Amino acid sequence: MTRHTLSLSIWLLACAPAEAPTTAPDPCTDCLYGEVELDPALLAAEMDKADGDPCAAYPGGPLRADSLLVLLNRDEGQQLAEDAQPPDLVPIDPVLMVAGRQGLARAHVRAAYRALADAALAEEGFDFKVRSAYRSYQTQCFTFDYWVRVKGLAHASRYSAQPGRSQHQLGTTLDVTCEAWSWDLVPEVGQTPEAAWLFENAWRFGFTLSYPEGAESITGYGYEPWHFRYIGVEAAAEMHEAELIQERYLRACQAQDPTLSCPEELIAPLTPNFEFIGAPCGSDADCVGAGEGAVCLTDRPGGMCSKPCTRLCPDQEGASGTFCVADAVEVDATPATTGLCHGRCDHDLYGESGCREGYACVVGQRPSEGGAGAVCLPL
Ligand SMILES: [Zn+2]
């Protein structure tokens, strides 16, 4: 609970309205089923006042979040497990988000979205931003629970995905919007040139529309022209070629339809980066002086003492040379991480300062008297 409260406090600071509404307007009067999220401020208020765990009422399903082609829908057994969390969530660069919003996505999805947004801007001048990205099982519990209390179970099932059924839990699904849509998510935006461009082109970048117009009886969801799920570039191309909607395509893949190849995109695993200005070592015993929890990384030439560092780097666009330094614990991150991404001082690249703007080169004695090391730290 503490972790959620902390992370939501940050959202609150970023975009709290003057007064959090106590009830939300009915967002959907005639659609079958939607994925309406709560305003971040309202969600934070719900989490703060909750006693007990709303997830206790929702046992979750059997599915994991690592396959790009996993089928999620209202059928029994097609739900994600409570602890199903994608392995490589990273923050989405603020310039790709609607102002004041924060979001997480799988690393390769973030890169694919950047390519899509760049192409939309270059080809048509459209300025797409992400309004909503990864949502944890727990977030969905609070959201769904809120709607159950406000509207009752039957209505809640129309407005909001039950925990484990939301594609947003995959870390591959983005709700996108733009200024021409007043940064909103309503079915009417499906009539705009911006939506037409997305429908025509999103597959080139691996994204597919999950809930098309007129497909409610197949998907069980109302029309959501803003909700795109990344399934991989080759799979999206095959789906496009076969003229299938996403639900039909994923069902066919699950049934091993022989007319489809259903390519699973290979994702290079992002692993925690253990680099740290540490001392040469032969075993953990040599690293006692490097601080609590320090270990010897024997896969480095001569060994290297390091504290475990679980931040995935780079964690921002345009910071490809960064690595994890075990200098912080971020308890409000999802997942909780140790360390921050920093770059090495590079005087060839950055001249006298050795670091990009906003950072300073700090030369420090390595722990265990292993000589000096230099790293860029924020000013
Ligand atoms: Zn969505």
Image (cartoon, rainbow, N blue to C red):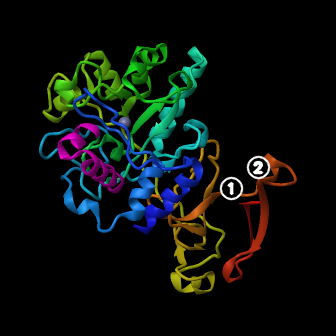
The reply to whether residue 89 is in sight is no
Question: What kind of element bears circle 1?
Answer: loop
Whether pointer 2 and pointer 1 mark residues with C-beta atoms closer than 8 Å, the reply is yes
Query: Which quarter of the image is occupied by the C terminus?
Result: bottom right
In front of the other: 282 or 102: 102
Which residue lies under the disc numbered 2?
356
Q: Amino acid type of disc 1?
A: Gly
Q: Amino acid type of disc 2?
A: Arg
Classify 21 as above or below 306. Answer: above
- State the extent of the magenta-drawn residues as a range: 138-159
Tell which residue pokes out farthest to the right in this image: 352
Confirm or reject: label 2 Cβ below 8 Å from ligand 1: no
Which residue lies under the disc numbered 1?
343
**Residue 264 numbered mark, or none:** none
Give how far across and how far down residue 309 sits, in percent: 53, 66
* Residue 56, magenta (yes or no): no
In front of the other: 46 or 361: 46
Give how far across and how far down residue 311 sits, in percent: 53, 60
In front of the other: 259 or 221: 221
Magenta span main SS: helix
Confirm or reject: label 1 Cβ below 8 Å from ligand 1: no
* Residue 140, magenta (yes or no): yes
Query: Which quarter of the image is occupied by the N terminus?
Result: bottom left
| Left or right: 107, with 347 as reference point | left
Q: Residue at x 24, y 18 (%)?
A: 214
Badge 1 crowding class, 10 Å Cα cut-off, few under 14, some 14 to 19, many 20 or more, is many
Q: Residue at x 17, y 31 (%)?
A: 251
Give how far across and how far down residue 319 sits, in percent: 64, 47
Give how far across and how far down residue 165 sits, in percent: 25, 44
Badge 2 crowding class, 10 Å Cα cut-off, few under 14, some 14 to 19, many 20 or more, is some
- Can you tell me which quadrant of the image ligand 1 is in? top left
